[in-house]
Image (tube, helix red, strand yellow):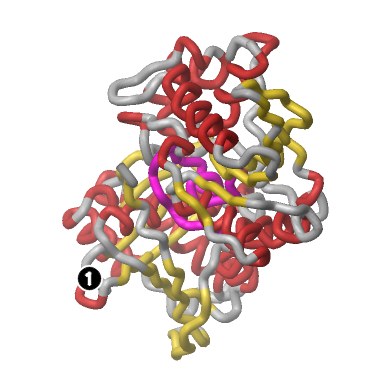
């Protein structure tokens, strides 16, 4: 008999930014790093003979959190990857839901009926992952093995093992990041001992992205609505500078945004929560191009959505854009007096590089490394 701990990977960018992550290989978030620490501590006293992982980086890093303290290496197996989402790969959930409402409903509630161009079927995912698990078990008779995979892949495996349809009342949940499912395998037959135990992360802050509405975006030409852009910038300026508008000038920022849009329409986006305006992002794709970094000129959320986790979804569009452009870091300025913004950026992995004089007080130059967001195919 082989004991298998089947674990979902830690939180990665695609989770936090509400992306259709699939086989898009984004970076682990700061919260994800804390989850790995908690998972590692959970397995300190658990004897483990081998560690296997999907070959996507969010799974590998999770597996290494268990393997390294035990002096083990992580063995990678592409059959443990997440579902290939085809044309939905790396798309944001809010946009997918708006463009494909029926397919989205099937994806969530009738997975066996779901299929989009270029995607795997759930049946294929279950078959490849179970083949991998059987081979792993066969190579580790009377041993204990850790296997790190992905949310939908694990659900497909368990549905097959338990003989449950992936629909209606039998639909299994997608477990929390780093949740542990325990299996036993004997003579190629699996028994489920426990499912989706995430007790080791109960003391960590709740992942706010799980309960938030998924924002949708559309490219926004500032020339189509100059007052919208300038009003957003004015409100953000006052918030950042404690109500001080002494040096505020809307026109230069508006003209710069028009230039950014003309160079790359994806660089300026307007956001919606359902049909209500939620915010704006403005990226300057030329600034930093020579040095390999991306620049965010302006990130804005309406006041009623601030401090609730929505900002990460807006930031995610910049991450995706600059990943496609081959940048490995992003930079921005934040007013030293804007404590809420500084907390947000630090939470999202930004670090302060330097301080410089601004028209209304010091500005921090902040930088965040990004994972590249490539497809591993």
Provide residue 104's location: percent of width, then percent of height: 47, 21
Provide residue 265's location: percent of width, then percent of height: 23, 49
Residue 329 belongs to magenta span = no
Q: Is residue 355 left or right of residue 221?
A: right
Q: Is residue 73 above or below residue 309?
A: below
**Element under label 1?**
helix
Name the quadrant containing residue 61.
bottom right
Mostly what secondary structure, the magenta segment?
Answer: loop
Provide residue 120's location: percent of width, then percent of height: 37, 24
Q: Is residue 197 above or below residue 115?
A: below
Residue at image mark 1: 289
Residue at 59 percent across and 71 percent down: it is 342
Tell me which segment is drawn in magenta. Answer: 8-29
Quick one: quadrant of the C terminus? top left
Determine if residue 173 is in view. yes
Q: Nearer the viewer, residue 18 or 76?
A: 76
Q: Is residue 342 above or below residue 278?
A: below
Residue at 69 percent across and 10 percent down: it is 169
């Amino acid at each position: 008999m082989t004991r298998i701990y089947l674990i979902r990977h830690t939180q990665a960018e695609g989770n936090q930014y509400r992306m259709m992550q699939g086989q898009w290989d984004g970076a682990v978030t700061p919260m994800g790093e804390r989850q790995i620490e908690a998972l590692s501590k959970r397995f300190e006293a658990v004897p483990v003979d081998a560690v296997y992982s999907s070959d996507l980086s969010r799974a590998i890093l999770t597996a290494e959190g268990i393997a390294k303290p035990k002096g083990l290496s992580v063995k990678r197996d592409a059959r443990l990857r997440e579902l290939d989402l085809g044309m939905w790969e790396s798309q944001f959930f809010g946009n997918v839901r708006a463009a494909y409402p029926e397919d989205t409903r099937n994806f969530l509630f009738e997975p066996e009926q779901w299929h989009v161009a270029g995607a795997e079927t759930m049946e294929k995912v279950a078959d490849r992952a179970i083949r991998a698990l059987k081979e792993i078990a066969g190579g580790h008779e009377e041993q204990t093995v850790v296997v790190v995979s992905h949310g939908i892949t694990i659900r497909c495996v368990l549905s097959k093992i338990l003989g449950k349809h992936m629909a209606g009342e039998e639909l299994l949940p997608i477990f929390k990041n780093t949740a542990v499912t325990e299996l036993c395998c004997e003579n190629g037959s699996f028994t489920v001992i426990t499912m989706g135990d995430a007790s080791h992360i109960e003391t960590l802050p709740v992942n706010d992205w799980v309960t938030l509405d998924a924002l949708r975006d559309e490219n926004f030409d500032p020339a189509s609505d100059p007052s919208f852009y300038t009003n957003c910038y004015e409100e953000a300026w006052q918030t950042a500078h404690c109500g001080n508008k002494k040096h505020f000038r809307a026109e230069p920022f508006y003209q710069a945004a028009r230039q950014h849009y003309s160079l790359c329409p994806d660089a300026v986006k307007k956001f919606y929560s359902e049909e209500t305006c939620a915010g704006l992002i403005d990226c300057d794709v030329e600034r930093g191009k020579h040095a390999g970094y991306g620049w965010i000129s302006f990130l804005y959320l309406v006041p009623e959505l601030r401090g609730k986790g929505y900002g990460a979804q807006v930031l995610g569009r910049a991450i995706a854009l600059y990943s496609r452009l081959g940048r490995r870091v992003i930079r921005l300025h934040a007013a030293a007096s804007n404590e809420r913004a500084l907390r947000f950026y630090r939470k999202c992995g930004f670090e302060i590089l330097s301080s410089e004089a601004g028209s209304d007080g010091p500005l921090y130059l902040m930088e965040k490394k990004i994972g590249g967001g490539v497809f591993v195919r």
